[in-house]
Image (cartoon, rainbow, N blue to C red):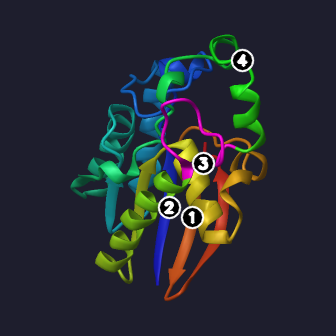
Amino acid sequence: MTRIILARHGETVWHKENRYAGSSDVALTPRGTAQARALAAWAGIQKLDAVVTSDLARAIATAQPAAAESGRELRQDARLRELHFGHAEGLTAAEIRQAYPGIYESFLTDPELHHLPGGESPPDAAARGLEALEEICTAHPEGRVLVVAHSTLIRLLLCSFLGIPLRHYRRVFPKLLNCALTELEFTPGQASLLYFNAPLPS
């Protein structure tokens, strides 16, 4: 049995402005840095076996303090990157609607079939994320691992594990808080959701 705790990175400059960050490198805000410190305080008392992060700067900045507090070397994995939003990266919803009339509405209706122009398809992102988590479970068959990743990727992974069609990820999991915790338990052939989007203890 492996337990994986998924945590979204801390708040960034673009997310504060409701801009799509995707696979762009964006810095944490002061609030995001404080959230990373809170995650580190939590990690320091969890007896984690490993800390793994996306290779994007915002995830690394969030995960590094947690790895240090838990006494683990931080490992980066590019497969844990956020879904790439293509030409929509850095834009707000209003700007996307203006630049691509009708396309954003199709994306909201079925983001699996109608991903944003120039962007990555959700099934491709889910597949790489699943591959990364499977390797973590193999490396830590009886462990508890913190994985710092991204909102859309985490929601796609949850849909994959729970048998929910990917096109519903925005509806079923409408929001993921920065540095909130989602824990899954993996046994051979199945995954169980223990809790979702739990705020860090204050």
Highlighted magenta segment, given as a residue range: 111-122
Please tell me whether mark 4 or mark 2 is closer to you in this view.
4
Q: Is residue 93 magenta?
A: no
Relative to 70, 32 lies left or right: right
| Res 201 label | 3
Q: CA distance from mark 4 to mark 3?
A: 42 Å
Q: CA distance from mark 4 to mark 1?
A: 38 Å
On the image, the x and y values in percent for residue 167 come to 70, 52
Indicate the amino acid at tag 1. Glu
Q: Are the residues at dot 1 and dot 2 in contact (C-beta closer than 8 Å)?
A: yes
Quarter of the image for the C terminus: give it. top right
Q: CA distance from mark 1 to mark 2?
A: 4 Å
Please tell me whether mark 4 or mark 1 is closer to you in this view.
4
Residue at the spot of label 2: 5
Indicate the amino acid at tag 4. Pro
Relative to 180, 147 lies left or right: left
Q: Dot 2: what SS?
A: strand
Please tell me whether mark 3 or mark 1 is closer to you in this view.
1
On the image, the x and y values in percent for residue 96 come to 64, 18
Q: Residue at x 25, y 57 (%)?
A: 71
N-term-proximal mark, 1 vs 2: 2
Indicate the amino acid at tag 2. Ile
Q: CA distance from mark 3 to mark 1?
A: 15 Å
N-term-proximal mark, 4 vs 2: 2
N-term-proximal mark, 4 vs 1: 4
Choose between 184 and 49: the one closer to the eye.
184
Q: Are the residues at dot 4 and dot 2 in contact (C-beta closer than 8 Å)?
A: no
Residue at the spot of label 1: 183
